[in-house]
Image: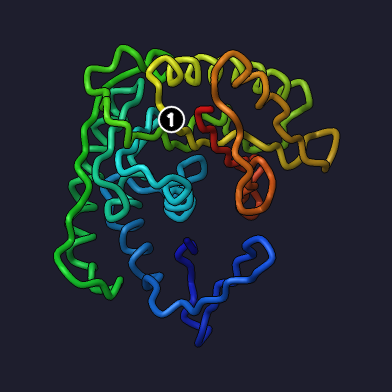
Amino acid sequence: MPNFGSWKSLKQWFLVIPLNDYWLVGRVDTYANQEFWSVLDLELPHKSLKSGIINLKLARSLLNLTKKSVVWDPFCGQGRLIVAGLDLKRKFLASDIATNCILETQLNYLQAKQIWSKNWQYFHLNGNFLPAELVTEVLDARTLSKSKNFDTSSDLAIVTEGYLGTNFTQPPSLQNIQTELQKLIELWSEVIAQASQLKISELVFCLPVYLRSKESKQKMWPQFQDLLIKKTNYRLCYLCNQKPGILYSRPKSLVGHWIVKLVQT
């Protein structure tokens, strides 16, 4: 599924998809007005106009990587993943270790429902807008099995930007990077082990790619995916780029997002 972008300057868009020995070609007839995402960004009580907060289009891209209709975001922050995909899913579970994050997610969700309903015509879709349900909980992502709101449905996936470590304002040193990576290994190992225990079939999340350091302009890629899934029954999916991840980075950013997807074997 294509991401929503600023397409006003072009008259026609086509999708070209390789499939075995064939090419599938299709024309995009309708797409969302870019103004909608600006409205959503600006009118939320807790806005994302600062670095370190998930971008709406990145959030939507993450949601498009699973067909599951129930999504659990255990690092919900301000709930940007939820408000970006109210039309895509049936239900969201939003949890975070910080109480203020849950309150901000709830307020953003309530405002986003009104914005979505008001601007539904941008999508040129028939029928009434039915926003996804939201259930929130204060919970450490390393203790998912303690959730009181866990949905036992097989139609559940974890989708989250997750925690990418320190939001550096200056290029970090190699020592800083190694320290961050070790913390992230420990964190994600626990989260993935908990997801495996709960038999959650799909996880979509982000790992950090350090785009430059004090000592070098070369990218520092995460090398610990195998460590994260070694003791579980998950495997890495190869995505549309034929790689086990997609790099998403913003201009002038010091840390990019390496988007990965795990599925149960």
Q: Nearer the viewer, residue 174 or 223?
A: 223
Where 112 sits versus 92, above or below?
A: below
As drawn, 248 above or below 265: below
- Amino acid on which the number 1 mark rests in the picture: Ser
The secondary structure type at the circle numbered 1 is loop
Depth check: give the residue in front, 125 or 4: 125
- Residue positioned 24% across, 41% down in the render: 91
Q: Which of 57 and 177 is in front in this view?
A: 57
| Residue 197 located left or right of residue 242 | left
Of residue 167 and residue 249, the one placed in the foreground of this image is: 249
- Residue 177 in percent (x, y) is at 71, 25
Q: Residue at x 59, y 39 (%)?
A: 237
Does residue 172 appear to the left or right of 184 in the view shown?
A: right
**What residue is drawn where x is 55% and y is 17%?**
232
Relative height, residue 187 to residue 57 (above, below)? above
Q: Which residue lies furthest to the bottom in this view?
A: 11
Q: How crowded is mark 1: few (under 14 residues within 10 Å), some or many (20 or more)?
A: some
Rendered location of residue 251, percent (x, y): 64, 55
- In terms of image quadrants, where is residue 231? top right
Quarter occupied by residue 120: bottom left
Q: Mark 1 points at which residue?
A: 201
Whole-percent x, y for residue 171 in the image: 72, 36
Extreme-front residue of the structure: 21
